[in-house]
Amino acid sequence: MTAPAGTPRLALRGISKRYPGVLANDNVSLSVAPGEIHGLIGENGAGKSTLMKIVYGAVRPDAGEVLWDGAPLPAHSPAQARRAGIGMVFQHFSLFDTLTVAENVLLALPGVTDRAGLARDIEAMGEHYGLPVNAAQHVYSLSVGERQRVEIIRCLLQKPRLLIMDEPTSVLTPQAVERLFATLRQLASEGVSILYISHKLEEVRALCSRATVLRGGRVTGTCDPRQESVASLSRMMIGAEPPRATGAARQPGAALLEIDRLTMPPLERTGKALDAVSLTVRAGEVVGIAGVSGNGQGELLALISGEDRRAPPQSVRLAGAPVGGSGVVARRAHGLAFVPEERLGRGAVPVLGLHLNTLLTHDAGLTRGGLISASAIVALAASIIARFDVRTAGPTAAAKSLSGGNLQKFIVGREVVKQPRVFVVAQPTWGVDVGAAARIRQELVALADAGSAVLVVSEELDELFEICDALHVIAGGRLSARIPVAQASVERIGALMGGGAETEGAHA
């Protein structure tokens, strides 16, 4: 049955959802018209993801109703949502690690029996939209960025009438973002409604014709973002304009992290080999590595952190000490701190409290006579929460209870407070709101000001340009020459991320 003209495709009326200690959504109402690209913005913990999970049937509201084409949509499941025409790309992925890409997509496409044809469709769609994937690859071997590509392709293959996208561009080159936006605009012109959640306010201004702002679980306003500036949108979100990271004039000191002509086959059959990678990060500088996820970042980070111990000793040096064959604990003893891109599972144990998660990388002062001091770890967690403005029920709250951005603030803070000699961080502000991102970036710059060597691996080019002294680009397992930020441009770096000629050869 066709809805009357002017009826919203989706309407939320008085949606409320409470968790222990948190009111995630408080009487939220919004509507999305057929063919509208509607932005949803707000700081971390504002209730955006909870609200979208309610629409998708993954969470049931405590109050309120969801209307679909003007009719009440009763309590439903994600499978029922997909059948109604609702598709969602989650910020935290909903993929089965032990299945292949094609098998994960197949689960969302009931009735499809031609697996070979599906695999061809997946790879063709990926190539068309600049999101290349290997349909036969197992998900457990994919990087975070590659998993996000799978989520986007799986959703597009469902031909949804409402497409919900939660931070979909965090792992794309600027060129790929433009291709994705062109796709979304085409979908909207064909009548598909799009709910677009992003912390990148420039994206919201460029793509959306209307935006709803959430703050503290409540709607604080609706606007046409095309008529707003980034500063005004930021004020609506967090009550202030986000400051840019600033630091003192620094003269780089001794080399604290050195990678010397490191060539290494991948651990996984489907991984990326590294080819003669050389890199130097000195005391008092921030060096960035840009690149589309899946081009060797994960392999390089594992060799730096000590998770992969196959490197020759002299090929990885910390403060001059050869550590290529050393494990994680030995490298920490040399002053290395590391933040992985995966928050839950690697950065934090989901079911453990934040206080217990501090023990993953802290030990000094937290034990007495061989026993863990409960008061010490709670105090440490509380200090991190306060310093980094982590929105949580308290220091003993389970890691999985935090929003993605708040958990990221805690994990980064846990390492920053150690004042490491060498700090390596992957995707420091992925899925983090503008205010929290500014805080994290300022902390990274402050570490360099204090004499640390900071290496940042990120697909956020604006972030790298803001905080880094120099950049490299990784593509196909090869690292470009060092590029001073003053000589870089978004176009140049974006082209290199896509495999431009400057990545031929590897230089320090």
Image: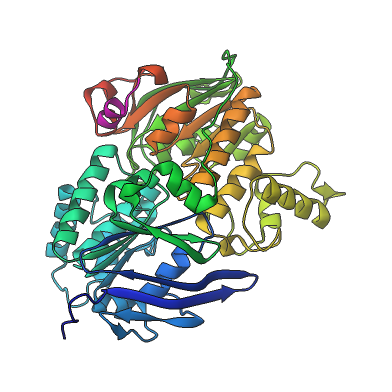
Taking the image as drawn, is residue 102 in sight? no
> Picture quarter containing residue 419?
top right
Q: How is the image coloured?
A: rainbow
The residue furthest front is 227
Q: Is residue 32 left or right of residue 14?
A: left
Measuring 45% from the left and 50% from the top, which residue is drawn there?
431
x and y, in percent, of residue 81 in the image: 31, 77
Q: Residue at x 64, y 22 (%)?
A: 451
Q: Residue furthest right?
A: 369
Left/right placement of residue 41 relative to residue 240 reads left
Q: Is residue 491 shown in magenta?
A: yes
Asked if one can make out residue 28 in the rendered structure from this viewpoint, the answer is yes
Note whether 69 is above or below 53 in the view shown: below
Q: Position of residue 153 (x, y in %)?
A: 24, 58
Screen quadrant of the C terminus:
top left
* Nearer to us in this view, 17 or 133: 17
Residue 18: percent from left, percent from top:
57, 75
User: What main secondary structure does the magenta stretch of the protein show?
Assistant: helix
Query: From which residue to which does the magenta span run?
Result: 488-495
The answer to whether residue 32 is left or right of residue 315 is left
Quarter residue 465 falls in: top left
Nearer the observer, 439 or 38: 38
Q: Is residue 156 part of the magenta span, yes or no? A: no
Residue at the image point whose x is 54% and y is 34% from the top: 424
Query: Residue 449 or 15: which is nearer the viewer?
Result: 15
Compared with residue 489, is residue 443 higher up or lower down, i.e. above or below?
A: below
Q: Quadrant of the N terminus?
A: bottom left
Q: Nearer the viewer, residue 375 or 386?
A: 386
Give the residue displayed 27% in from the left and 82% down from the top: 70
- Image spot of residue 224 (x, y percent): 33, 54
Q: Is residue 337 left or right of residue 474?
A: right
